[in-house]
Image (cartoon, rainbow, N blue to C red):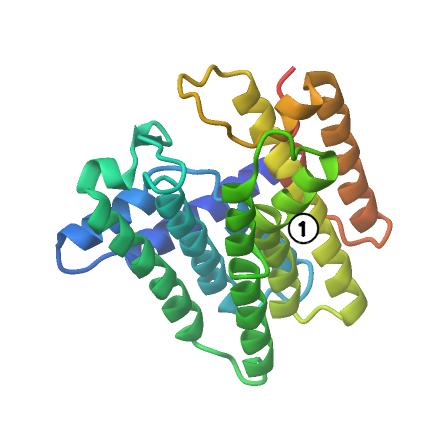
Amino acid sequence: MTGARERLDDKRRTVEGALDAGLAGEDSVLLRAMRHAVLSGGKRFRPLLLLCSAERFDGGRGLELSFACGIELIHNYSLVHDDLPAMDDDDLRRGRPSVHKAFGESVAILAGDALLTLAFEVMAGAACPDGLAARKAEAMVLIARAAGLRGMLGGQALDIGFRPGNETEAAYEELTARKTGALIAAAAEAGAVLGGAPEGDRARFAAFGKTIGLAFQLRDDLDDAGQEDARAEFRPNEAAFLGAARSRAKLAGLLESALTGLEASGLLSEELRALALSLEPPG
């Protein structure tokens, strides 16, 4: 597992370098805000998942890094907008002032819009090896769908409308599957698509990503449930709803299900295993 973690660190550094290069250019307040949003740490879970999924097949032959960066730019645009006063009204992100606190609300809105636009510019502009145009187009549609009405943005709308008294485990799972899980599932499936996976294997990676997406949010909720929130407004948190013991048991079950599904098909790499197990709660 140590070797797998080292390989993941190498991939993370490659993604960081590509993101840094993609956000280079003539200095402006907008570009500084975009860099502040993206180059401030973060797990890079989605791009690593895409790269590791593509690697299980023919690797995407150069397309996969652009798509990994694209999906990370989409994720970060969503965080910029989530932090706005009209949404979650968060002052901090990754231990630093959120973009609207550092640059103002109007610049933050533009920075989020610019990151989303740049994501599709990066993916669409990726040099396409002969014969891979269909894979490239299919992966872009898949990611766009996951980021939009039927995925992440639809999930954010559910989040805004989520109220105390409406809480059920099924409601939380629907919220998570769209707001957080859709883009994670798309990362796994898009990697398989770019790698030229057969239809059955593509479906297995989509299922893996969907389950890992549920686990990812539950792990975040477990971390957040133990922290006092000075604000009075309600925020959806499945771990707080289920309680720590049930949440830990559910998280363990999700991780086991995800790993077993790929392992049974001989598709589970040590890096994918390490990514999944990084979601285990401490202790």
Q: Quadrant of the N terminus?
A: top right
Q: Secondary structure at mark 1?
A: helix
Residue 6 placement: quadrant: top right
Query: Picture quarter containing residue 218?
Result: top right
Answer few, some or many: residues within 10 Å of disc 1's Cα (few below 14, many 20 plus, some between 14 and 19).
Answer: many
Specify the quadrant of the image occupied by residue 201: bottom right
Residue at the spot x=71%, y=34% of the render?
168
Q: Which residue is mark 1?
A: 209
Q: Which residue is pictured at 51% across the width and 52% down the height?
A: 47
- In the displayed structure, 48 sits above or below 24; it is above
Q: For the C terminus, which image quadrant?
A: top right
In the displayed structure, 240 sits above or below 113; it is above
Q: Is residue 240 left or right of residue 93?
A: right
Give x and y (percent) for residue 55.
Answer: 63, 58
Q: Pick the residue in front: 14 or 88.
A: 88
Q: Report if residue 3 is visible in the image.
A: no
The residue lying toward the viewer, choosing from 96 and 246, is 246
